[in-house]
């Protein structure tokens, strides 16, 4: 009976290695997002090379499109960062500590995950930043037809401030 128990416990413990599929998939997805967003960044910059030679109205249109595109780029980089933090966190929680990160002077405390709650808190902060960027992206194209529209927009900004305040105040209690 003891041999069966030992076999089952070893099997159960080694099953944690199945998390490597999520770690690898998340890492590859992160790298793919970094590549796509970097290509988009280069493309955007190449469209701006003749900015000074444009007429005033064309410049205003290109400026508006560029600001929207930059916000989308920030959103993409944040999503890639979420995937990267997720892969680091899963690896550290289920597989092993990342020795290279612990011994490096350049490593930040952002990537050290000590519990599942720690991973969720870090991911939640990055997701909150993505939502803020999305809000800003939509704000760039909003049309304020009525005073209520402006009031709702101000309420959205107040809620963002509250969310940031609550996320930082929860952090100081730990």
Image: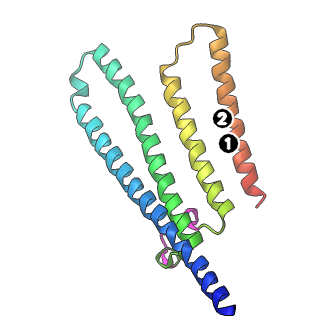
Q: Residues within 10 Å of mark 2 (few under 14, many from 20)?
A: some
- Quadrant (top left/top right/bottom left/bottom right) for the C terminus: bottom right
Q: Is residue 70 visible?
A: yes
Q: Is residue 46 left or right of residue 21?
A: left
Q: Secondary structure at mark 2?
A: helix
Could you tell me which residue is drawn at 44 percent across and 51 percent down? 80
In the picture of the structure, the residue carrying the numbered disc 2 is: 160
105 drawn magenta: yes
Q: Secondary structure at mark 1?
A: helix
In the picture of the structure, the residue carrying the numbered disc 1 is: 164
Residue 70 image position (x, y, % from top left): 40, 36
- Seen from the viewer's position, the closer of residues 55 and 6 is 6
Residue 134 image position (x, y, % from top left): 52, 33
Q: Is residue 108 visible?
A: no
State the mark number for residue 125. none
Residue 173 image position (x, y, % from top left): 78, 58
Boundaries of the magenta span: 103-112
Q: Are marks 2 and 1 in contact (CB under 8 Å)?
A: yes
Q: Is residue 6 left or right of residue 16?
A: right
């Amino acid at each position: 009976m003891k041999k069966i128990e030992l076999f089952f416990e070893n099997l159960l413990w080694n099953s944690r290695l199945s998390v490597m599929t999520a770690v690898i998939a998340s890492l590859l997805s992160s790298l793919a997002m970094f590549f796509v967003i970097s290509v988009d960044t280069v493309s955007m910059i190449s469209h701006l090379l003749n900015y000074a030679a444009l007429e005033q109205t064309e410049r205003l249109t290109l400026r508006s499109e560029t600001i929207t595109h930059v916000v989308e780029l920030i959103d993409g980089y944040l999503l890639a960062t979420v995937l990267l933090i997720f892969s680091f966190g899963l690896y550290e929680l289920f597989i092993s500590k990342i020795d290279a990160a612990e011994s490096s002077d350049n490593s930040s405390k952002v990537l050290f995950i000590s519990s599942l709650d720690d991973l969720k808190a870090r991911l939640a902060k990055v997701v909150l930043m993505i939502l803020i960027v999305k809000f800003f992206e939509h704000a760039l194209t909003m049309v304020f037809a009525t005073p209520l529209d402006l009031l709702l927009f101000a309420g959205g900004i107040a809620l963002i401030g509250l969310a940031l305040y609550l996320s930082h105040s929860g952090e100081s209690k730990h």
